[in-house]
Image (cartoon, helix red, strand yellow):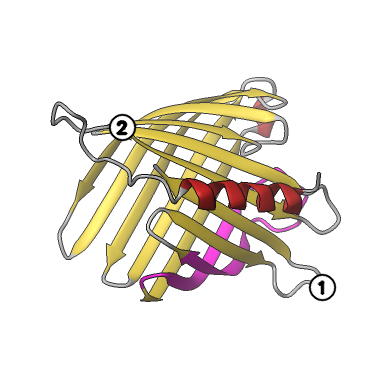
Amino acid sequence: MTTVRCLAVLTLAVLLAGREAPAQTTDDAGETAWSFSASAYAYIVPGDDDYLQPTFTADRDGLHLEARYNYEGLETGSVWGGYNFSMGEKVTFEGTAMLGVAFGATTGVAPAYKATLSWTKLVFYSEGEYLFDTNESSDSFFYAWSELSWAPVDWCRIGLAGQRTKVYRTDREIQRGVLIGFSSERVDFTTYAFNLDERSPTVVMALGFGF
């Protein structure tokens, strides 16, 4: 099954899941309940293998747990623990400091962060990690993903994106591109196009939902 077909199947499953009862913010005892999210990024890479990069997160108050696959490298998994914090009212900032371990084809340990800065309809999001490769120190690498988006309406956003990765072959230190995204209450679908000056840009389709 191709990456695009995998994403189509996942889309249908997410849309069906989105029709279930709304996510709870507190449990029966009145305490903060767990919140979960799942996402899958389908990478369509010219001249290289297409692949799917899934991520699962679980949060409760300040605690953040996360699992990824194919993020630091193909056939590589990683697990993370971290701390959530936020501040601001008109201009809001949400951040997560994390520490993770990668295993599989690539092995190592990594400090990481996630950060979101929001003001009215503008949102800047950034995530990054520095992987200390435990097999070969020269393969240690800083991975990063950033977005600047504007939402003209609640269900649509457009913007710019950039990434730094070595999961697939590229001559560019930083890949730059554009994005357009659509969302409902719990489901989000975004398409990215990187390296638009090339004959065949790299396309990433991302599907996510929370529950």
Q: In front here: 122 or 190?
A: 190
Rendering coords of residue 135 (x, y %): 68, 20
Residue at mark 1 to residue at mark 2: CA–CA distance? 45 Å
Q: In front here: 51 or 8?
A: 8
Which residue extends farthest right?
A: 47
First in sequence, mark 1 or 2: give its number: 2
Magenta-span inclusion, residue 83? no
Rendering coords of residue 194 (x, y %): 66, 65
Instruction: Name the residue at 51% across, 26% down.
Output: 79
Instruction: Name the residue at 81% across, 44% down.
Output: 1
Q: Is 47 above or below relative to 40? A: below
Magenta-span inclusion, residue 167? yes
Among the 4 quarters of the image, the one containing residue 4: bottom right
Rendering coords of residue 137 (x, y %): 65, 26
Instruction: Name the residue at 39% across, 42% down.
Output: 211
Residue underneath mark 2: 34
Among the 4 quarters of the image, the one containing residue 113: top left
Instruction: Name the residue at 44% across, 51% down.
Output: 19
Q: Which residues are magenta?
A: 154-182
- Number of the front mark, 1 or 2: 2
Q: Secondary structure at mark 2?
A: loop
Q: Are marks 1 and 2 in contact (CB under 8 Å)?
A: no
Mark 2 surroundings within 10 Å by alpha-carbon count, few (fewer than 14), some (14 through 19), many (20 or more): some
Amino acid, disc 2: Trp
Q: In front here: 144 or 59?
A: 59
Amino acid, disc 1: Arg
Residue underneath mark 1: 199
